[in-house]
């Protein structure tokens, strides 16, 4: 889909150790390699403590990597001097979980802020800020202070502010984690729109799979300070290869057999298989019932996916017969253990 | 005892006190505010950590703060003479007042500057702000309500010090209390002056609190 020339963020053997050399040193990132393509929405997901926030802060060097390279739009940030880095950062917008707006400034002043930093005149900055606030749907709140805005509105101001200097990349650090589900969807749709209309590459850091499913095309899973799995979101969902990926994909809270015994299978259906009564046919053909432990459907990259977790009967040979049936029908499944 | 001569004395003392308090506070802020901001940003977790300088300045501030003001008043006499030519009168008193007050102002400004949320500073850094831009456009504007509260309490401290300076011929209401209330035992006069000082403190406190709330855009609706 994209050639090597289209890589906008290239991360190579990135490592970050806090308090290096001291007895309390903490390894936050270890040998992270990542290529993010121009114009895509790339998700980085992981549980708390996996190193997500550190990783995204290494992309604009808010955190100095201990080792490795970060190249954004052809510039190796890790080699820039402070003025060069400040200039490069203007082309990398960032939004945060806590919005981080200037609390003593109005929405308009907040959006003017990066423009004024970059040397724009007041008039010019205000004109552009008004346009940007209209772009995020806040044309009537320009004079409001952050404390007078809702969480969703604050994040819209933050998005307008991050877009002010026409960045090539927008980094989102848990940008919707402090918002309710409805507001989360609205903000995600806005980000999708911005990606589509302005061609801004978006990097989404999150701990929620539903954020990745909704807007990301590709995803990297971060666990224990390195990337354990990455690829198209639909591929990772269909066929998670690692424990960390399975944990994130399975319904929250994990699943376990009803009576503590019996094997669990996870079946994934996409648009081409959902119209066949797979489970019913399997039960009829094997002559034994199964229990449904969990089931849900998801929209990934515009396609509907369903996942079903079933508990197989514990009788001798019956599980094997059912798996053989699924194989013959070309249904992909994974066996779930220890979840 | 409350004749017109005394009234004139009180009015002069009142204005001398205001003069000493404001002048000493102004100079203390000129020194203390930049010093306080420096102490905040040069902390290990600040935007520009400078452990050695931070510790050096911090130690000077702590040292000056631990000298009781009455002792500072006496100890500073040679320096006061050198700068002002005399050690008597309200103008001369400004020297020890500043020496005693700027460390207090610095610590208060440091606390205000450090109360600005790290995330807001991080956001400015992500937009390519320099350290100086972060200080002038993020830390100071965001700390305004807290700085105002701190200024009110610093003014009250300086006012208290200025009254104490009466012991060493410092002028102002403090001198009148010492001379009339202490040396002559005219307790009536002393109580009148105490009331005036208490009122002044109340006015500064109330004005500071109101100004701080009024300037704080973060507490209008929510919070």
Image (cartoon, rainbow, N blue to C red):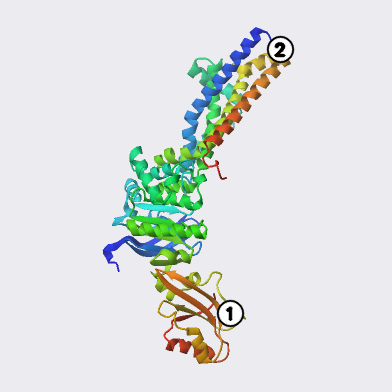
Is A127 left or right of A147, judged from the image as shown? left
Is B126 left or right of A266, judged from the image as shown? left
* Residue at x 58%, y 90% (from the top left corner): A315
Report whether residue A145 is seen. yes
User: Above or below — where is B123 with respect to B205?
Assistant: below
Q: Foreground: B85 or B106?
A: B106
Q: Nearer the viewer, mark 1 or mark 2?
A: 1
* Residue at x 55%, y 24% (from the top left corner): B97
Question: What secondary structure is found at the residue carrying circle 1?
Answer: loop
Q: Where is residue A185 in the image (x, y as percent from the top left)?
A: 46, 60
User: Above or below — where is A130 with respect to A332?
Assistant: above
Q: Foreground: A337 or A295?
A: A295
Q: Position of residue B202 (x, y in %)?
A: 63, 27
User: Above or below — where is B210 with respect to A44?
Assistant: above
Q: Foreground: A265 or B37?
A: A265
Q: In the drawing, what numbered circle is on residue A257? A: 1
Q: Marks 1 and 2: same chain?
A: no
Q: Position of residue B7 (x, y in %)?
A: 64, 11
Q: In the drawing, what numbered circle is on residue B184? A: 2
Is B211 left or right of B49, judged from the image as shown? right
Residue B206 placement: quadrant: top right
Residue B62 placement: quadrant: top right
Chain that bears disc 2: B
Bin the neighbour count of mark 2 within 10 Å (Cα to Cα): few under 14, some 14-19, many 20 and up: few
Question: What secondary structure is found at the residue carrying circle 2?
Answer: loop
């Amino acid at each position: 889909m994209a050639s090597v020339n289209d890589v906008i963020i290239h991360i190579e053997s990135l490592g970050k150790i806090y308090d290096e050399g001291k007895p309390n040193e903490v390894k936050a990132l270890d040998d992270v390699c990542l290529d993010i393509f121009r114009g895509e929405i790339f998700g980085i997901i992981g549980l708390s403590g996996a190193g997500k926030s550190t990783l995204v802060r290494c992309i604009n060097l808010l955190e100095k990597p201990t080792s490795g390279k970060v190249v954004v739009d052809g510039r190796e940030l890790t080699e820039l001097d402070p003025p060069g880095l400040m200039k490069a950062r203007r082309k990398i917008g960032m939004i945060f979980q806590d919005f981080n707006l200037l609390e003593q400034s109005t929405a308009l002043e907040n959006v003017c802020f990066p423009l004024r930093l970059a040397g724009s005149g007041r008039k010019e900055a205000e004109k552009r800020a008004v346009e940007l606030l209209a772009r995020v749907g806040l044309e009537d709140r320009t004079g409001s202070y952050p404390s007078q805005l809702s969480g969703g509105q604050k994040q819209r101001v933050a998005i307008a502010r991050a877009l002010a200097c026409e960045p090539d990349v927008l980094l989102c650090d848990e940008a919707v984690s402090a918002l309710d589900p409805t507001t989360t969807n609205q903000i995600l749709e806005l980000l999708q729109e911005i990606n589509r209309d302005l061609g801004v590459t978006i990097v989404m850091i999150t701990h929620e799979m539903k954020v990745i499913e909704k807007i990301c095309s590709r995803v990297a899973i971060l666990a224990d300070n390195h990337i354990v799995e990455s690829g198209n979101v639909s591929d990772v969902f269909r066929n998670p290869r690692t424990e960390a990926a399975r944990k994130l994909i399975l319904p929250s809270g994990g699943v376990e057999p009803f009576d503590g015994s019996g094997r669990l299978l996870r079946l994934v259906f996409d648009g081409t298989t959902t119209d066949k009564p797979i489970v019913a046919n399997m039960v009829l053909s094997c002559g034994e019932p199964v229990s449904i432990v969990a089931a849900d459907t998801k929209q990934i990259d515009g396609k509907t996916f369903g996942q079903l977790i079933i508990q197989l009967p514990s009788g001798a040979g019956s599980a094997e017969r059912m798996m053989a049936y699924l194989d013959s029908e070309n249904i992909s499944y994974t066996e779930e253990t220890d979840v | 005892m409350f004749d017109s001569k005394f009234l004139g004395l009180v009015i002069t003392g009142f204005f001398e006190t205001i003069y000493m308090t404001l002048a000493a506070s102004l100079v203390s802020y000129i020194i203390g505010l930049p010093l306080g901001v420096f102490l905040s940003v040069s902390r290990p977790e600040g935007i520009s950590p400078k452990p050695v300088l931070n510790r050096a300045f911090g130690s000077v501030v702590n040292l000056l703060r631990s000298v009781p003001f009455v002792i500072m008043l006496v100890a500073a006499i040679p320096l006061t003479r050198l700068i002002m030519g005399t050690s008597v009168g309200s103008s001369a008193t400004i020297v020890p007042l500043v020496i005693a007050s700027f460390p207090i102002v610095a610590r208060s400004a440091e606390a205000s500057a450090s109360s600005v949320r790290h995330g807001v500073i991080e956001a400015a850094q992500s937009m390519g702000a320099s350290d100086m831009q972060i200080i002038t456009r993020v830390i100071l504007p965001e700390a305004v309500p807290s700085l105002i509260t701190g200024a009110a309490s610093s003014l009250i401290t300086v006012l208290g010090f200025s009254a104490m300076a009466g012991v060493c011929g410092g002028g102002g209401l403090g001198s009148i209390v010492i001379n009339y209330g202490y040396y002559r035992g005219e307790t009536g006069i002393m109580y009148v002056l105490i009331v005036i000082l208490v009122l002044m403190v109340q006015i500064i406190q109330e004005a500071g609190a109101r100004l701080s709330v009024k300037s704080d855009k973060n507490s209008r609706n929510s919070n």
